[in-house]
Image (cartoon, grey):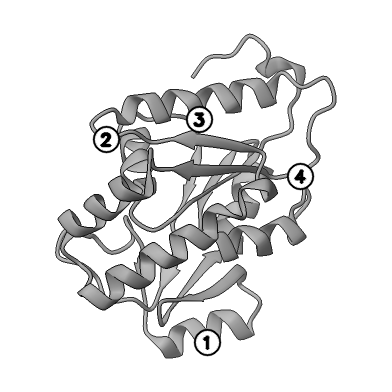
Amino acid sequence: MNSQCSAWTENPLVIVISGPSGVGKDAILDRMKERGYPFAFITTVTTRAKRENEKDRIDYHFISCEEYQELLKSGSLLESANVYGNWYGVPRKPVKEALENGKSAIIKVDIQGAATIKKIIPDAVFVFIMPPSLAELSQRLTRRCTETDSDLSLRLKTAEDEVQQLQNFDYVVINPSNNIESAIQDILCIIAAERCRVKPRKIEL
């Protein structure tokens, strides 16, 4: 991504991507990685079991509960949250290394994780990914075939509650069905606009 304003600041950004489960956060970031955009995509660690289509150290760092607790105790996690009975955490080291190398870091977390990061890095850029409607989100989760009926109901109820947290974010991006390019372009435009700020965000970690 080229931006005429990128030279105005040498400060790299921390971009936090969040939104309800099933909204397409992974698909958006996977497409951005494939295209080689010049960001550090931070891989979350989790105790969740790996799904059939997932790859260790690419989709997530899949680790045991014992390993996770060791990371937590040593202060190696930027944030940590228990989501649907599984632990998820953002490793601190790769974020710090990206910033030190002048590279913007993109972090994908749930709503709870975004709130935690906002306390630690208040000048991060917070982007909420939204479905066109909750009905469509239900269809996406159903097609994914990774949840039981009770899990599906819980995720949809949680999604309704999470949408109420929208005011805590800087930007909202709609991810329509069969048009992921629209969401990607919106995210790239947000990053370009942030690079054009007269008063750059000051990221300290």
Q: Image point 37% across, 72% down: which residue? A: 154
Q: Say which of marks 3 and 1 sits in front.
A: 3
Q: Secondary structure at mark 1?
A: helix
How packed mark 3 is, by other alpha carbons closer than 10 Å (few <14, some 14-19, many 20 or more), is many
Q: CA distance from mark 2 to mark 3?
A: 16 Å
Question: Which badge, 4 or 1, is on the more N-terminal residue?
Answer: 1
| Residue 69, numbered label | 1
Give amino acid for label 4.
Asp
Nearest to the observer: residue 87 or residue 186: 186
Q: Is disc 2 placed on a helix, strand or loop?
A: loop
Label 2, residues with CA under 10 Å away: few <14, some 14-19, many ≥20: some
Mark sitting earlier along the chain (2/3):
2
Task: Tell me, yes or no, whether the two marked residues, 3 and 4, touch with CB atoms within 8 Å.
Answer: no
Return the residue at label 3.
187
Q: Is residue 192 above or below residue 21?
A: above
- Residue denoted by label 4: 123
